[in-house]
Amino acid sequence: MTSRTKFHDDFKRDAVSQIMERRSPIREVAGRLDKSHQALCA
C-alpha cells in the first residue's frame, strides 16, 4: 500500500491559488512546487 504525502495548509492554499486565481495549469504549478501533477490532483 502506498502512503499519501500530507501537505501543510499553507502549501495547499498556495497551490490552489496558483491554479484557480492565476489560471496556471496544474502541471506548471506542480513543476514550480517540485511535485508531480498527480500529487496535486489527489
Image (spheres, rainbow, N blue to C red):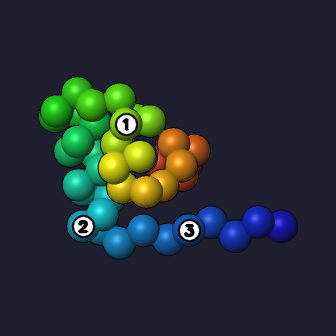
Pointer 3 or 1: first along the chain: 3
Which amino acid type is marked by label 1? Glu
Residue at the image point whose x is 36% and y is 55% from the top: 33
Disc 1 packing (10 Å; few <14; some 14–19; many ≥20): some
Q: Give the residue number, with chain letter if any, for mark 3.
A: 5
Relative image position of residue 16 (x, y in whole percent)? 28, 46
Mark 3 vs mark 1: give the one in front: 1
Placement of 22 over or under 15, stated as above or below: above
What amino acid type should be assigned to the residue bearing mark 3?
Answer: Thr
Q: Which residue is mark 1?
A: 28
Give the answer, above or below, for where 35 lies relative to 21.
below
Residue 10 badge? 2
Q: Are marks 2 and 3 in contact (CB under 8 Å)?
A: no
Element assignment for label 2: helix
Q: Residue at x 16, y 33 (%)?
A: 22
Q: Which element type, helix, strand or loop, lies under badge 3?
A: loop
